[in-house]
Amino acid sequence: MSETNILLERDGVRLAVDDTVATVTLCNAAKRNAQSPALWRALTEAGRQLPGQVRVVVLRGEGVSFSAGLDRQAFTSEGFDGEPSFLDLARGPEADLDATVAEYQEAFTWWRRTDLLTVAAVQGHAIGAGFQLALACDLRVCADDVQFAMRETSLGLVPDLTGTKPLVELVGYARALEICVTGRFVHAEEAERTGLANLVVPAAELDAAVADLTAALLAPPRDAVNETKALLRSALSAGAAAQHAAERAAQGRRLRDLAGVGE
């Protein structure tokens, strides 16, 4: 039996690695895994610490909620200990604000690396930043009590943690606009029907369903999986001719590998 190693545990984030599978856990259940700049920095560091043999990363949240979104302390005059509030950032130079938000976004972008497959196990509330973190992953397995919501617009803000593109890709522009502007909850049945959730299961079966999916994702050869992920991601934006050429190039690499060419 392989051994699970804890590589990181700080600021509400735990990274555990068991051979080819890593698990990133939001572990501040008392605050429903509310997010903060410190948590985002820890998530970014988790991505940097992944050993090279890891193929699948599972993202989960402890407790009743995946993540209830941004910790509202960010908007108080005090902010978080040791760093400015978001309001203070807004009063500073525009370039500094842009650079700070770009740093926060790094916690949400590494999940799309083509050498990894990422799975969010989502239960309870996934609101705002929590919704966007689930959207950052390739796949979402959801408990039947899941409640997604994008509340930023209701607060006079916009979703800025890289969630707008995957949301539109999954549900289409019109539905994404309606979800964001109304701030309403998207429950399990709609999430599965519209493609937000790849699978919905009873809450008690969430861990088992994620384990089954992880095993299936690990079954094919890694290089073929990585090439396929890269092709599917480029298909969203590439023209037909460019995509066809990318398919030919990727298949050429796979065939040469299988034939032992270049060894």
Image (cartoon, rainbow, N blue to C red):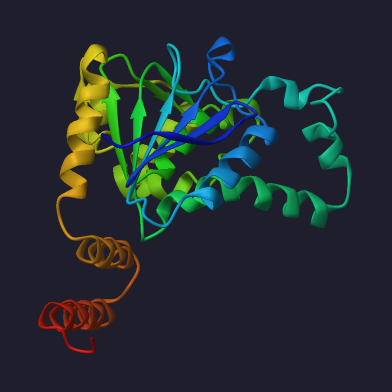
Q: Is residue 162 above or below residue 130?
A: below
Quarter of the image for residue 3 reads top left
Q: Is residue 154 above or below residue 177?
A: above
Horizontal and vertical percent position of residue 98: 73, 53
What residue is rendered at 43% in x and 22% in y?
184
Relative side of 185 to 221, left or right: right
Relative side of 18 to 240, left or right: right
Q: Can see residue 146?
A: yes
Relative side of 42 to 207, left or right: right
Relative side of 61 to 100, left or right: left
Please name whichever residue, 98 or 262, is drawn nearer the observer in this view of the structure: 262
The count of marks equals 0
Specify the quadrant that holds the C terminus: bottom left
Residue situated furthest bottom in the rendering: 262
Horizontal and vertical percent position of residue 111: 44, 49
Specify the quadrant that holds the N terminus: top left
Horizontal and vertical percent position of residue 26: 51, 26
Horizontal and vertical percent position of residue 45: 60, 46
